[in-house]
Amino acid sequence: MAAERLLVVDDEPRFRNFVKNVAVKSGFEVECARDKHEFKTLCESTEPDVVVLDIVMPDIDGVELVQWIAERGIQLHLVIVTGFAHNYADLAKKLVEAKGLLSVRTLTKPVRMADLQQAIIRST
């Protein structure tokens, strides 16, 4: 049985590495993207089961990436992470649910390892 695939997109290298370490320990194959271009390329080539998405990044709003995923009919589980107001993540969650993605969870930075692990495992 193949391992679940997880793609993390975040502009902060420390957070990307944190997610990668937690996901690898949980049995995932992991790819990391630091911007929208890497994300789109990796999302199309790796077909992830789970995406951990920073909703606020310098070059693109995470909501735009959610719309990009939905427009292509990509079915995946999404974990939205924000270091800003949780309301923004909740708004993105409602958009995701309306677009018909499989599931969505939200986390607020700083993220505890146990909370991240629970979110990615329960998403699959």
Image (cartoon, rainbow, N blue to C red):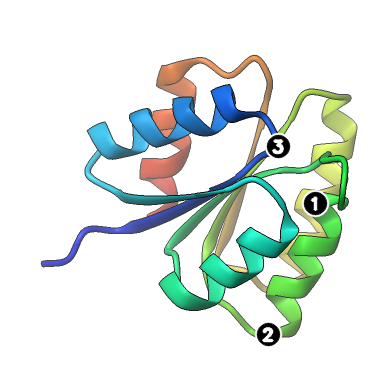
Q: Is residue 117 above or below residue 121?
A: above
Question: Which quadrant of the figure contains the C terminus?
Answer: bottom left
Whole-percent x and y of residue 65?
76, 62
Residue 85, by quadrant, is: top right
Helix, strand or loop at label 1? It is helix
Residue drawn at x 76%, y 82% is 71
Distance in Å between CA atoms under marks 2 and 3: 23 Å
The residue carrying mark 3 is 11
Residue type at mark 3: give it: Asp
Residue 118, by quadrant, is: top left
Distance in Å between CA atoms under marks 3 and 1: 11 Å
Helix, strand or loop at label 2? It is loop
Q: Is residue 56 above or below residue 111?
A: below
The residue carrying mark 2 is 72
Whole-percent x and y of residue 45?
47, 76
Q: Is residue 98 above or below residue 105?
A: below
Whole-percent x and y of residue 67?
80, 70
Residue type at mark 1: give it: Gly
Please report whichever mark, 2 or 3, sits nearer to the chain's N-terminal start.
3
Question: Which quadrant of the figure contains the N terminus?
Answer: bottom left
Distance in Å between CA atoms under marks 1 and 2: 16 Å
Please report whichever mark, 1 or 2, sits nearer to the chain's N-terminal start.
1
Mark 2 or 3, closer to the camera: 3
Q: Residues within 10 Å of mark 1 (few under 14, many from 20)?
A: many
Q: Which mark is residue 62?
A: 1
Whole-percent x and y of residue 48?
44, 65
Please report whichever mark, 3 or 1, sits nearer to the chain's N-terminal start.
3
Residue type at mark 2: give it: Arg
Residue drawn at x 54%, y 33% is 16
As drawn, is 39 to the left or to the right of 88? left
Residue drawn at x 29%, y 48% is 28
